[in-house]
């Protein structure tokens, strides 16, 4: 089982990045995928979750309207489009898979995790 994040990097404030989470080793359609992030010295926070039927929820008011989660079932990939990036979005971003979609924020229930991708926003 593997989840691999990609697309992170260094971007100026106001810019955009598109993160990807590619899954392998399990039946993608049976899982919901969530995005999390952890900034230095802070706790990990949930950002969004999408089901195999495209149910979507965003957990943080700070990203609503700026971040968009989407899924490409055929490729087993979930994207997180991040626009209007701010310095405070700087963090390591992780994707994770859970057997069922949930609108409840939190890491509980996520079975598989990726290694993370660094996003750095310069002010």
Image: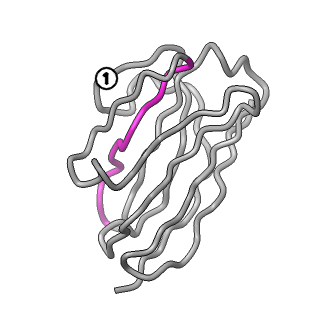
Residue 94 percent location from the top left of the image: 52, 48
Q: Quadrant of residue 86?
A: bottom left
Whether residue 2 appears in magenta in the rendering, the answer is no
Vertical relation: 6 (above or below) 79? below
Query: Position of 91 compared to 103: left or right?
Result: right
Q: Quadrant of residue 79?
A: top right
Give the residue at x 71% y 34%: 23
Residue 19 percent location from the top left of the image: 58, 54
Give the residue at x 58% y 72%: 9
Q: Which residues are magenta?
A: 41-52
Q: Nearer the viewer, residue 76 or 35?
A: 76
The quarter in which the C terminus is drawn is: bottom left
Q: Secondary structure at mark 1?
A: loop
Q: Nearer the viewer, residue 98 or 28?
A: 28
Residue 3 percent location from the top left of the image: 68, 39
Give the residue at x 55% y 25%: 111
Give the residue at x 65% y 16%: 29
Query: Where does label 1 land, which residue?
Result: 103
Whether residue 50 appears in magenta in the rendering, the answer is yes
Mark 1 crowdedness (10 Å alpha carbons): few <14, some 14-19, many ≥20: few
The quarter in which the N terminus is drawn is: top right
Query: Which residue is most to the left?
Result: 61
Vertical relation: 38 (above or below) 113? below
């Amino acid at each position: 089982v593997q989840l691999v994040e990609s697309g992170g990097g260094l971007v100026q404030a106001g810019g955009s990045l598109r993160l990807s989470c590619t899954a392998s080793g399990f039946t993608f359609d049976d899982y919901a995928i969530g995005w999390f992030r952890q900034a230095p010295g802070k706790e990990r926070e949930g950002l969004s979750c999408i089901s195999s039927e495209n149910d979507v929820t965003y957990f943080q008011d700070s990203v609503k309207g700026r971040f968009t989660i989407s899924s490409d079932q055929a490729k087993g990939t979930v994207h997180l489009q991040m626009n209007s990036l701010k310095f405070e979005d700087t963090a390591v971003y992780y994707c994770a898979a859970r057997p069922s979609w949930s609108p409840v924020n939190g890491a509980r229930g996520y079975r598989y995790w990726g290694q993370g991708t660094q996003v750095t926003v310069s002010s």
